[in-house]
Amino acid sequence: MSKGKIFVLTGPSGVGKGTVVQGVLKNLNNIYLSVSATTREKREGEKEGTNYFFKTKEEFESMIKTNEFLEWAEFAGSYYGTPKIQINNYLSVGKDILLEIEVQGAKQIKEKRPDAILVFLAPPTFEALEERLIKRQTETLEKVKIRLKKAKEEMKEISLFNYLVINDHLDEAIENVSSVIKAERCRIG
Amino acid sequence: MSKGKIFVLTGPSGVGKGTVVQGVLKNLNNIYLSVSATTREKREGEKEGTNYFFKTKEEFESMIKTNEFLEWAEFAGSYYGTPKIQINNYLSVGKDILLEIEVQGAKQIKEKRPDAILVFLAPPTFEALEERLIKRQTETLEKVKIRLKKAKEEMKEISLFNYLVINDHLDEAIENVSSVIKAERCRIG
């Protein structure tokens, strides 16, 4: 049996990674979403084990110490991380896995797993991203400002990734990310 | 304006390259089919300038001498070649171009244009290919035998190409080749 592949969807906070991921999972078979651990507060409608494994700061730091993460990052005051165990379980039985993670974490994946395929999801313009973050109203304007500053830095690093998909029209973005996965499954070597 | 990309669909004779190409062209915008020159006999329904530019042996050999081909090959007793001029015209205005060519020619393209993206279309089994070639009834059994022997050799060279698409279910094969093109348009670098 051939081994599964790791696909990573990353991009600035607020660019729409979650919505694109949901569309991609509807389009494709044999790909599973990695569930991250986080210390950030649960948003309305989010479910433990589906959206995230919600951890306290102490729990998360203990998992870092015992080397349980494939990648982890601190972002806008919270920890986010990908537990190794679920990834290895899927890959070993030939299933592909999709990670939706922040840019810092994606860079760690690239270092540790050069075979992972990284897709950077970018907003059509920086102004569009600002608008989306403000509309989301899940954070104080202070936190939005921090995220925007971070996004500007992250977008300078696009060249580190394998694919760039612009999230201008949602359907097109979903289609393009799905195509990357389908194409990579046909890639030789 | 960014430059266009060259996509090459290759694979053994009789594998169904032409049918897949037609499906891909229906799916996608901004990609143009390169029309090859050939000395082989025109089949029923084929049109000059649409399917091929039909040439005499003398005309073709004169074009080889004046270096007018990006690639050319002799295959099952006929010449096939890709005139350079149309390719360069499309690429220079940022259009992608799709070439449907024999394996020998595809290997030449890879040498001359390492930036070209090569997709190898393979039959699900060798027996399926044999059946298809015999059903086609466009050639003598003698010529079918030559094509089959060639196909066996070509399939050993799959690792030279970028992508492998199995033409088992036509819709899936068209979808996979289309995905390769869409994904490569998002590729960074």
Image (cartoon, coloured by chain):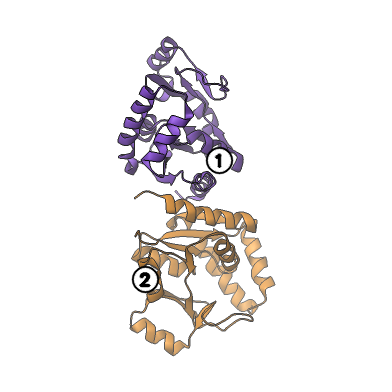
Chain colours: A purple, B orange
Residue shown at 36% from the left, 59% from the top? B115
The subunit carrying tag 1 is: A
Q: Nearer the viewer, residue A89 or B46?
A: B46
Query: Residue B88: which disc?
Result: 2
Query: Residue B152: which disc?
Result: none
Task: Give the image quarter of residue B128.
Answer: bottom right
Task: Give the image quarter of residue B26.
Answer: bottom right
Residue shown at 54% from the left, 25% from the top? A51
Q: Amino acid at mark 2?
A: Asn
| Circles 2 and 1 on the same subunit | no
Q: Residues within 10 Å of mark 2 (few under 14, many from 20)?
A: some
In the rendered structure, the answer to whether residue A143 lies left or right of residue A51 reads left
Q: In this figure, which residue is indicated by the disc labeled 1?
A: A24
Residue lying at the far right in this picture: please name it: B135
Task: Give the image quarter of residue A104.
Answer: top left
The subunit carrying tag 2 is: B
Q: As displayed, is residue A148 above or below residue B173?
A: above
- Label 2 SS: helix
Q: Residues within 10 Å of mark 1 (few under 14, many from 20)?
A: many
Residue B127 shows in the view: yes
Q: As displayed, is residue B87 above or below residue B172?
A: below
Q: As displayed, is residue B154 above or below residue A33?
A: below
Marks 2/1: CA–CA distance = 36 Å
Q: Quadrant of the N terminus of chain A?
A: top right
Q: Amino acid at mark 1?
A: Val
Residue A28 shows in the view: no
- Label 1 SS: helix
Q: As displayed, is residue A4 above or below residue A78?
A: below
On the image, the x and y values in percent for residue B25 come to 55, 64
Q: Nearer the viewer, residue B145 or B19?
A: B19
On the image, the x and y values in percent for residue B23 come to 59, 62
Residue shown at 43% from the left, 31% from the top? A133
